[in-house]
Image (cartoon, rainbow, N blue to C red):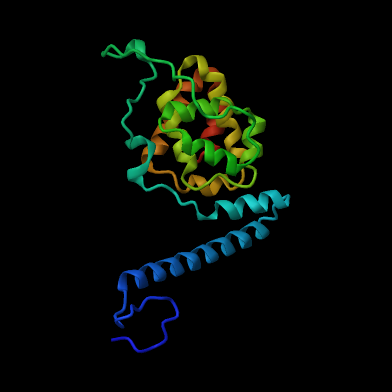
Amino acid sequence: MWKGKNSFGIVGKDGEVNFSKLERQIDTAVAADERYWTQNQAKIRAVTNKVASYEEFEEIVKASHLKPLEKGDRISDMDVFTQPWNVASSKDNYTFTEPAPSDLSTSTLKNLTQFNREWRKGKQPSDRFQLLLSMTEVDVLRVFRAEIGLGLLGEIIEVIQICFCEDQMEKVCELLTALPKCGRFDLSLNFLSHKEKLALKSILDSVSSYLGLEKVAELSTLYQLD
């Protein structure tokens, strides 16, 4: 029987400790402590990187609790099919269906926080691809000026590989060219899985006829595929 001070209401009138309530309070305290230190590290990182404005600083701190998805949660494991690039040469008879119009907002995205919110709304790759198509190079550089969230680059690559077709070549090339100019891009590359790197190589092979071998070689270097 507990005879100490009942500061947190965890002891009943009969003097027995409510261990379930105690466990919840401990979990809450641990989570609060972890969030504090995560945000503190994000603040240090933002100051070290000399962000251009307080808005960028605030975005990094707000997104500090976001973690890369586990491999089991990646888009590649969703119930979708992979669109072969050269449909005509495939032995199987594939029928490509254009992505349905997305419910995602296509208004100009101002920052990473807005992008993450719209990106997570997309339940299917086609939804997320529509969001990417709505962004110009200026949008990409503005949204990801501070950083591309860890794990997000791989998700973007997988969405492009699954969804894009030949008539979207120009837009895809614009995205591929803009992403290496974004903040902490090299760090994001380090978190690409082997499967995501293979997907990226496949995309670059597909756009080589549009960009030319010299430009593809340049992108391969930027994406560290050499």
* Residue 86 % position (x, y): 38, 16
Task: Name the quadrant containing residue 181.
Answer: top right
Asked if residue 171 lies left or right of residue 9, the reply is right
Name the residue located 69 percent from the left edge and 49 percent from the top edge: 55
Q: Can you name the residue that lies furthest to the left here?
A: 92
Closer-to-camera residue (23/217): 23
Name the residue located 63 percent from the left edge and 27 percent from the top edge: 136
Q: Can you name the residue that lies furthest to the bottom here?
A: 3
Asked if residue 51 lies left or right of residue 117, the reply is right
* Residue 135 % position (x, y): 60, 28
Closer-to-camera residue (21/205): 21
Closer-to-camera residue (20/194): 20
Name the residue located 64 percent from the left edge and 31 percent from the top edge: 108
Q: Can you name the residue that lies furthest to the front here?
A: 13
Name the residue located 50 percent from the left edge and 36 percent from the top edge: 119
Closer-to-camera residue (173/98): 98
Quadrant containing the N terminus is bottom left
- Please say if 226 is above or below 131: below
